[in-house]
Image: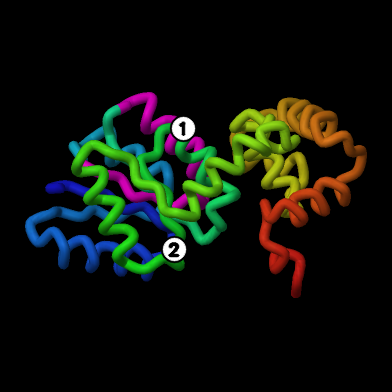
Amino acid sequence: MKNIIVADDHSFIRLGISFLLKDYFPSCKVIEVNDAESLISQIVSHHFDLVISDIEMPGRDGLETLQQIKSIYPGLPVIMISSYSEDLYAVRSFRLGASAYINKTAANDELINAIEHIRLGKRYFTPQIAETLLASIEQEQAPHNRFSLREFMVFKLLASGNSVSQIASQLFLAITTVSTYKRRIFEKLNISRDIELIHYAMTQKIIKTDKFIS
């Protein structure tokens, strides 16, 4: 691994990963960025052997960014990192082409193990993720698993308390388009009120309950 890019909006996370990488791969060059737009710009402009990206950064959603990266450079390995549990984003990440999914609470060895697997041309699955992938086969028909990527993004933002106009602004969409996504989401969840959507998201651990705790 000669050139690695790390994307995370928290500087201490980027710094920690950079120190770890440079310690384990002394000759590697590590570039740090703090948002999805900068990540895409760097990838288009320079050659990288590996991308390590947070799942949730300001602006563009991490899953959407992953999808764009893989559409441009299908062979570029991407490790997704997140503070969210594996059962929420791991399956979607792997379906979009991620080579590994690492929880930020994991030991440093986990990230190094993932990189070593990737160097051998393999994907890396933690035991927890392996169980999650198996469970996802059984839960394939869960309502939120039938969302498209964009529907899932709108769903998350709605569940976090954002209005339709706020979501339209964040995702650079027309308000009518977001309203259509919201209608489809309500239909798939068989609900009619925002509070029901929030309750569903909290029950499924799709959002953190501390978002609503002052």
Identify the secondary structure beneath mark 2.
Answer: loop
Identify the secondary structure beneath mark 1.
Answer: loop
Q: Is residue 37 left or right of residue 163?
A: left
Q: Nearer the viewer, residue 177 or 23?
A: 23
Looking at the picture, which amino acid does disc 1 mark? Answer: Leu
Indicate the position of residue 43 as horizontal and vertical percent values: 28, 37
When asked about the image quadrant of residue 67, the answer is: top left
Quadrant of image for the C terminus: bottom right
Indicate the position of residue 160 as horizontal and vertical percent values: 72, 53
When asked about the image quadrant of residue 153, the answer is: top right
- What range of the chain is rendered magenta? 49-74
Label 2 crowding class (10 Å Cα cut-off): few <14, some 14-19, many 20+?
some
Q: Earlier in the sequence, mark 2 or mark 1?
A: 1
Q: Would residue 64 be counted in the magenta stretch?
A: yes
Indicate the position of residue 72 as horizontal and vertical percent values: 34, 25
| Residue 168 visible in the current orientation | no
Q: Outermost residue, left direction?
A: 27
Q: Nearer the viewer, residue 48 or 104?
A: 104
Looking at the picture, which amino acid does disc 2 mark? Answer: Lys
Q: Is residue 2 left or right of residue 197?
A: left
Residue at image point 29% right, 64% down: 109
Q: Nearer the viewer, residue 111 or 120?
A: 120
Give the residue pinned by disc 1. Answer: 96
Residue at image point 45% right, 54% down: 127
Q: How many marks?
A: 2
Residue at image point 33% right, 40% down: 123
Give the residue pinned by disc 2. Answer: 104
